[in-house]
Amino acid sequence: MSIVINGISVPYSGEKIQKDEFRSNFMITSVVLPEQIKEIDDYAFFNCQCLESIEMSNSIMRIGEKAFDGCVSLKSIRIPDRVKIIETSFSGCEELKSVFIPEGVTKINLCAFYWCGKLESVNIPNSVVEIGDDAFGKCPHLIIKCKKDSFAHKYAIANNLRFQLI
């Protein structure tokens, strides 16, 4: 098995990207994770300031605390289908513009996308029944796309966030 880093296949064994494994690595610009990876542990890619893209397979079930915090160049995220809880994993991703959250995610933790200043829109599925405080704090351009009377709709109203019904 291998991970593709900056277009180069790197041998990798195990089902988990370990805690702090690539922390503050300023050489990484892109990562493609294979099906064998089931978990990205806490701080795994923390402060990888040059990381622009990450492709995660749907085999991933957990993205740890602060796994991508401070990845200021990251442009978009597609949360894998098997993830149920979005931890505080993406705060400080200043260039992040889009996030895809699949049906099946039930919770978005506090400050999950805090200070993602360029985040424009997030489609929040009906399966989300809990959103933590400041999950989208300091995201001045954000429009939450959600269904009428969904938890996300009520959250957006209660927190004075812009929303669009879909």
Image: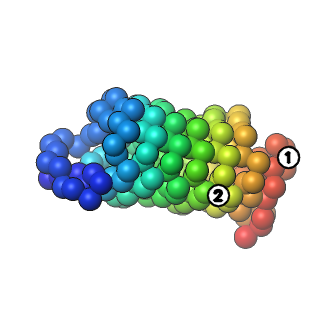
Within 10 angstroms of label 2, few (less than 14), some, or many (20 or more) residues?
Answer: some
Residue linked to disc 1: 160
- Coordinates of residue 72 in the picture (x, y in percent): 53, 43
Foreground residue among 148 and 8 = 8
Residue at the (67%, 59%) spot, across then down:
121
Within 10 angstroms of label 1, few (less than 14), some, or many (20 or more) residues?
Answer: few
Point out the tag, 1 or 2, that comes first from the N-terminus. 2
Q: Specify whether 143 is left or right of 19.
A: right
Q: Specify whether 33 is left or right of 120.
A: left
Residue type highlighted by circle 1 = Asn
- Total label count? 2
Q: Is residue 102 above or below residue 67?
A: below
Q: Specify whether 61 is left or right of 123.
A: left
- Coordinates of residue 149 in the picture (x, y in percent): 79, 58
Residue type highlighted by circle 2 = Val
Residue at the (17%, 49%) spot, across then down:
10
Q: Is residue 21 above or below residue 84?
A: above
Residue at the (64%, 58%) spot, across then down:
122
Residue at the (64%, 61%) spot, across then down:
123
Marker disc for residue 105: none
Q: CA distance from mark 1 to mark 2?
A: 15 Å
Foreground residue among 14 and 31 = 31
Foreground residue among 50 and 78 = 50
Residue linked to disc 2: 122
Q: Is residue 130 above or below residue 120?
A: above
- Coordinates of residue 39 in the picture (x, y in percent): 33, 42
Instruction: Answer whether residue 113 is visible to the viewer in this image.
Output: yes
- Coordinates of residue 165 in the picture (x, y in percent): 77, 66
Q: Specify whether 93 is left or right of 6.
A: right
